[in-house]
Amino acid sequence: MERASTYVRIPMERIGVLIGPNGRIKESIEKKFNVELQIDSEAGNVKIMLSPDAQDPSALFRTREVVTAISRGFSPERAFKLLEDEETTLQIIDLREILGRSQSDIKRFKGRIIGKNGRTRGIIEELTEAEVSIYGYTVSIIGNTDQANAAREAILMLLKGKQHRTVYQYLYKKRSELKKKDMELWETKTPTF
């Protein structure tokens, strides 16, 4: 019987990050998910197969998400946040779909998202508590659904040409909404004696 598998294509320069020093990252992923990674370092293809004794078939797709996050510029530590909670998600914005294929437009808008000395990206991460990676022609986000959606909206606002000040105002407002929502959830879960 053939084992369940899936493929991910990653940039050549990210293969070393996926493997890690002395193969530690690859080994860690294989152990956490009970999968086997076959990495073709010449073509950039990664085959993910469930181990013969794997019990959870969803591990295949969770592994794919972690490998994809690493391929989109996240460090393994940041990509492993996808394991912390089932609500944590990876969202990828393809700048070519929004801006077209103009390399100069993509470069300019990546600069707007990053900001001077990484300030804009840092503010987006701080106020949404999501992780943001700008790599190649993509902007990727890791966070729970609300965090990722807030970060995505802020990034899309920048891509539409909104001023940074307007985006920051949106983020501060969204942060207040998220904190209020968290408090309401916490209060409803508090046991009464």
Image (cartoon, rainbow, N blue to C red):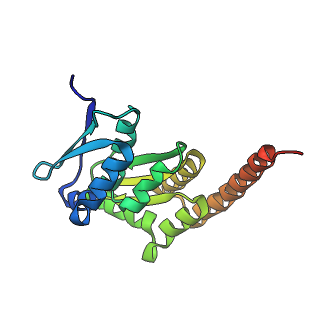
Residue at (28% x, 54% y) in the render: 27
Residue at (39% x, 32% y) in the render: 55
Question: Between 150 and 99, which is closer to the camera in this rendering?
Answer: 150
- In the image, residue 9 sits, relative to residue 12, either above or below, namely above
How many labels sit on residues? 0
Q: Quadrant of the C terminus?
A: top right
Residue 19: x percent and y percent?
24, 58
Residue at (45% x, 70% y) in the render: 115
Q: Is residue 66 left or right of residue 159?
A: left
Q: Residue furthest front?
A: 53
Residue 50: x percent and y percent?
29, 36
Q: Is residue 62 left or right of residue 169?
A: left
Q: Residue furthest bottom?
A: 117
Question: Between 166 and 124, which is closer to the camera in this rendering?
Answer: 124
Residue 1: x percent and y percent?
21, 22
Q: Is residue 131 left or right of residue 95?
A: right
Q: Is residue 58 visible?
A: yes
Q: Residue furthest right?
A: 193
Residue 4 quadrant: top left
Residue 124: x percent and y percent?
54, 62
Q: Residue furthest top?
A: 1
Residue at (36% x, 62% y) in the render: 75
Q: Is residue 163 visible?
A: no
Question: Between 15 and 121, which is closer to the camera in this rendering?
Answer: 15
